[in-house]
Amino acid sequence: MADRPTHVVTGSTSGIGLATARRLAADGAEVVVVGRTRERVDTAVAELGPAASGVAADLLRPDGITALADALADRPLDGLVLSHGGDQVPGIFADSDPDRFPYLAEAMFLTNARLCHRLLPSLAAGPGRAEGGRIVLVTSDAGRAPTVGEAMIGALAAANLMFVRTLAREVARQRVRVHAVGVSLTEDTESYDRVMGAGDFSRRLFEKAAARMPFGPVRAADVAATVTHLLGPDSTATTGQVVSVNGGLTT
């Protein structure tokens, strides 16, 4: 890796993404902040300092992914952190709106796959670069443990986990390492506020989950610590791993 690594962090204007960007910037990395709105991107970049830059792009749109790729201009990347997610909330499957299923698939899974496909050449090893970069995908821990009210969320999170494990095997020849971080109830995030304010079902679901966490509550900085470890030099002997940061809710 370069003396000053470059990491792209999606969803990094708030929550886990911003907490990860803060740690990376504090460690001396160049950080590319990615968010939907220019105002929020500029605010995050101003906080992170001169080593940060920003791209405003709606990654749910093909032109948003193109805008990000064009802004990066094929420069070598040391890390890609996928933490953008969506606005999904728990609910009983039979009561859900099937018209939202395509959106959920796009927001939770397909966007991750498209970004990896587009940016993989910038992460791969090549002439003058013996080691490639790292990909860390942040997703719901419901992909590992069946949870009432999260049938679609869990299914798409499980797709992320298998995608990561399989991609890790495929891109090992390019010296790229790929991991996933599974999260559950994470305080000080917009996702937490949205779920807790969405209605009695989702609020009760996660209040019960919080009560079962022996090492909770989990905050965005806790997740960011694991993400940055997987991006760093102390994890060179691992790839294709799924690490849960859930306060011990599941093991």
Image: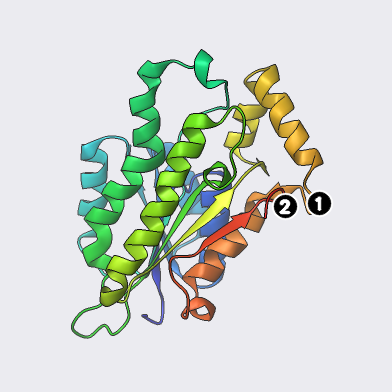
Q: Which residue is mark 1?
A: 214
Residue 118's x, y, as percent? Answer: 22, 54
Identify which residue, 102 or 27, lies in the foreground.
102
20 relative position to 192: left or right: left
Residue in the image at 65% along x and 25% along y = 202
Disc 1 packing (10 Å; few <14; some 14–19; many ≥20) = few
Q: Which mark is residue 147?
A: none
Identify which residue, 35 or 88, lies in the foreground.
88
Residue in the image at 18% along x and 83% along y = 127
Give the residue type that dot 2 points to: Gly
Q: Secondary structure at mark 1?
A: loop
Q: Which residue is mark 2?
A: 247
Image height check: is 83 above or below 58? below
Question: Could you tell me if the residues under marks 1 and 2 are in contact, i.e. CB atoms within 8 Å?
Answer: yes
Q: Secondary structure at mark 2?
A: loop
Residue 24's x, y, as percent? Answer: 52, 65
Residue 61's x, y, as percent? Answer: 26, 35
Give the residue type that dot 1 points to: Pro
Residue in the image at 38% along x and 36% along y = 107
Residue in the image at 29% along x and 68% along y = 171
